[in-house]
Image (cartoon, rainbow, N blue to C red):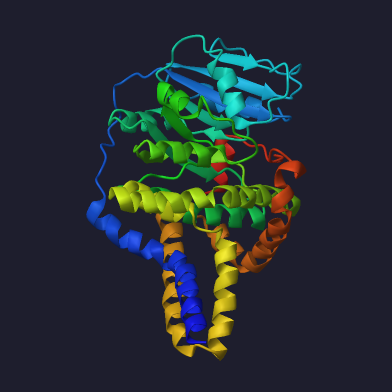
Amino acid sequence: MQVLITILIIIQIIIGFNLFLPVILYLFHFFNSKSHNTNKVTTNYDYAIIVTAFEQTTLLPGVVKSILNLNYSNFIVYIVADKCDISGLNFNSDKVILLRPEETLAGNTKSHFYAINRFVRNHDLLTIIDSDNLVDAEYLNELNIFFDADYLAVQGVRKAKNLNTSYACLDEAGDIYYRFIDRKLLFDCGSSASLAGSGMAFKTSFYIDCLDKLVIEGAGFDKVLQMEILNKGKRIAFAEKAIVYDEKTSKSQQLVKQRARWINTWFKHAGKGVELIFKGIARLNKNQFLCGLVFSRPPLFIIAGLSLLSIIFDIIYLPNMLFFWLFSIVSFFLIFFIALNYFKAPKIIYTALFKVPLFMFLQVLSLFKAKRANEISTATVHYYDSSLDEINQNQK
């Protein structure tokens, strides 16, 4: 019986560790973080901006307009319109190249390499943008700061372009939490920012070297790419002023399908995170070790559910463990609100927090659909269209 109790305590500590790890990172980042030169650099890198669209083209004019309004001139935009009707698209610019694959690609990296193989010149860098994104005018200039510092990979910020429903607000709240921990704190502690699927940039030759020989099916190409970068011993920088505006899930069905794919991705790649932890220990590599901890961490709603079950068990059988859970939960909320404050979350997000139970319930539904996630859909359906001026006005 004592052995069983010991095992249960160890399991609970592992679960709770995911709640107070951010506090540890937060404390350490004060001692490890290095300030970066925020002056606009003069290096005029040649960018390929790859915009991927699948089935939907309605938002492409908006993202192209925002790109053409960049305070930067040395770039070419490659739009890969996979399985799209492009008859109504007409971009009157020699900086925009519209590509329509003959056969359906149904994959992010396939679309990226379709564009790469059709580059009109050898671009120094490439950056990946989704069709539902809008790009801040200083996006490329902010990325350049880190490429000037010799980083090969940089992740920017994917900020909400819509806060029109409670679902969208809660989606952004969760994104802010992960943005603070998985990107800012990890990078400040000398590790790597987690990749986010878009709003990221790479030295072109490095990106090709990482993924050229890999076949990636379904969602999660960013996880595979991140693992390749870490296995090569490189760091991913976090450019918190390089902003793209990203559509947040605004409908329940949209949320369930999207989270099902994300959960499916976690189950597929969590083991790689555990391997990375041990690899980091063996090599005394802080970058790999810390990223491995984050990479293998379950989605937040799973941690919350397991924590609740543990607390109920401890109330009956292990009351002394309740102090551990009090510390863990207080740690989580402390960092959560520090994150919201740091990234200046609008008041509407705080108001939406009262609907967290419903948001978590929908994610539980996603768990049961995770196994069939890639069969249900291959891409998120987008509903919200807006301009940068409307976004800035709505988020004041």
Q: Which of the 4 quarters of the picture holds residue 315? A: bottom right
Residue 304: percent from the left, percent from the top? Answer: 56, 68
Q: Between 352 and 225, which is closer to the camera in this rendering?
A: 225
- Which residue occupies 34% across, 38% down? 233
Residue at 47 percent across and 41 percent down: it is 195
Residue 195's place in the image compared with 211, above or below, is below
> How many discs mark residues in the rendered view?
0
Q: Is residue 94 above or below residue 111?
A: above
Q: Is residue 179 visible?
A: no
In this view, the residue in front, 84 or 8, is: 8
At a point 59% along the width and 30% down the height, the residue shown is 215
Question: Is residue 80 visible to us here?
Answer: yes
Residue 174 x, y percent position in the rendering = 54, 56
Left or right placement of residue 292 versus residue 302 in this view: left
Q: 221 or 353, which lies in front?
A: 221
In the image, is 166 to the left or to the right of 339? Answer: right
Depicted 46 relative to depicted 266: above or below: above
Q: Nearer the viewer, residue 134 or 158?
A: 158
Q: Is residue 8 left or right of residue 125?
A: right
The quarter of the picture where residue 27 lies is bottom left
Residue 321 in the image: x percent, y percent?
46, 83
Query: Which residue occupies 29% across, 30% down?
Result: 150
Q: Position of residue 256 (x, y in %)?
A: 71, 53
